[in-house]
Image: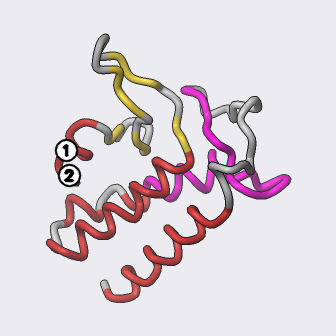
Amino acid sequence: MADVFLAEALDEKKESCIYHRYLDTNKYNTERHWWVLCEALEGLGNAFELTHDEKYRKPIVPFWNYISEHIIDTKIGEWHWCVDENKEPLQQQPKLSNWKAPYHNSRALMRLIEKMDKW
């Protein structure tokens, strides 16, 4: 799964990962969604922990940099739902909802920190 992620979802130019690809048109959604990024951090951390293959660890810091620079709202707090291809937050998406709460990003980061302490 991690190899497919690296092959199909990693966007090294933007130091992030795509949201999804439309199978019927083979086009990509160019938005960057908070949950995809935080789950990618944890998934890459898991893959590295299991294999010790640097290809899984390499994207973690750039992903975190992308999150801290573009996803985290440093003025008001919390994470934006997503940003567009110009790294601008999509304001029509809520910061908190039934599907978005600080639990997910906090959990992913705490679990990643636990893993990194062992590296």
Residue 16 in the image, given as x and y percentages of width and height: 43, 44
Q: Quadrant of residue 47?
A: bottom left
Is 114 left or right of 22, judged from the image as shown?
A: right
Residue 36 on the magenta segment: no
Numbered tag placed on residue 1 in the rendering: 2
- Image quarter hosting the C terminus: bottom left
Given the current orientation, which residue lies at the most extreme right position?
76
Q: Position of residue 43 (x, y in %)?
A: 33, 61
Q: Residues within 10 Å of mark 2 (few under 14, many from 20)?
A: few
Instruction: Tell me where residue 52 sits by quadrant.
Output: bottom left
Quick check: 101 left or right of 23?
A: right
Mark 1 residue type = Val
Above or below: residue 81 compared with residue 61: above
Q: Mark 1 points at which residue?
A: 4
Vertical comparison of 89 with 4: above or below: above
Question: At x 38% / y 36%, what residue is drawn?
Answer: 13
Seen as rendered, the residue at the extreme top is 25
Magenta part of the chain: 62-85
Foreground residue among 13 and 100: 100
- Residue closer to the observer: 74 or 115: 115
Residue at image position (29%, 13%) is 24
Q: What element carries label 2?
A: loop
The residue type indicated by label 2 comes to Met
Q: In this view, does 108 lie to the left or right of 53?
A: right
Horizontal side, residue 75 vs residue 92: left or right: right
Asked if the residue at tag 1 contacts the one at tag 2, i.e. Cβ–Cβ closer than 8 Å, the answer is yes
Helix, strand or loop at label 1? It is: helix
The CA span between labels 2 and 1 is 5 Å
Relative vertical location of residue 55 with respect to residue 51 in this rendering, above or below = above
